[in-house]
Amino acid sequence: MPIASLPYIDEHATVVAAGVEDVWRGLSETLDRSFASPGMACYARLVGSADCTASGPRPLAEGSTLPGFRVLAAVPGRELTLVGRHRFSSYALVFRLEEVSPRRSRLRAESRAVFPGPAGGLYRRLVIGTGGHAVGMRRLLTAIRHRSE
């Protein structure tokens, strides 16, 4: 499913006191650390994710996987696109980096997803409707910022 056809969920952003190269490295390392845990792999299997293990090149590049995600595109210092699917949803998470100044960058994370059927609707209410997704995204961006600075 093309990313543009997935409904927009939200976008979160942070300004990082580091250059885009440092933020790119921090992004890849933080995603590996956050998503490659045994708990995430277990959750990915539980919901029937297409990708349940971390594999492929590091730093993250096209074809790399994390539990629940596959790297669709990676343009170092610019954009990282993750996609995934499981029983309740098909989704994408797009990270975009912009240089604000030589030592400051803006990192944005856009989420898109579709939740088909009644089970998907319930899953959406649990993940999006409770605010859990937004809290998780803000924590992830904070972790990336701290690791990059």
Image: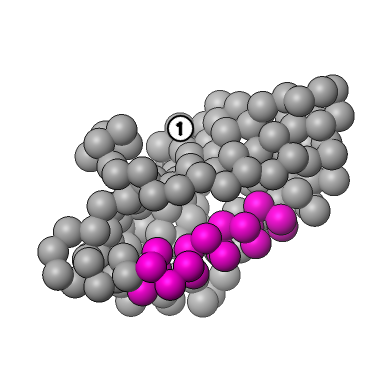
The residue that appears at 79% across and 45% down in the rendered structure is: 148
The residue that appears at 79% across and 52% down in the rendered structure is: 147
- The foreground one among 67 and 99 is 99
The residue that appears at 63% across and 43% down in the rendered structure is: 13
In magenta, the rendered stretch is 126-143
Mark 1: amino acid: Ala
As drawn, is 34 to the left or to the right of 99?
left
- The foreground one among 32 and 82 is 82
- The foreground one among 130 and 98 is 130
Quadrant hosting residue 73: top left
As drawn, is 91 to the left or to the right of 98?
left
Element type where label 1 sits in the image: strand
The residue that appears at 66% across and 52% down in the rendered structure is: 141
As drawn, is 87 to the left or to the right of 133?
left
* Residue 107 x, y percent position in the rendering: 65, 38
Q: Is residue 45 magenta?
A: no
**Is the residue marked by circle 1 packed among few (<14), some (14-19), or many (20+) residues within 10 Å?**
some
* Residue 128 x, y percent position in the rendering: 40, 64
Residue 140 higher or lower than 72, as above or below: below
Figure label count = 1
Please name the predominant secondary structure of the magenta segment in the image. Answer: helix
Q: Is residue 9 visible?
A: yes
* Residue 53 x, y percent position in the rendering: 45, 62
Q: Is residue 134 magenta?
A: yes
Quadrant hosting residue 75: top right
* Residue identifier under label 1: 73
Residue 51 higher or lower than 48, as above or below: above
Q: Check the image and name the residue furthest to the left.
A: 117
Q: Is residue 58 visible?
A: no
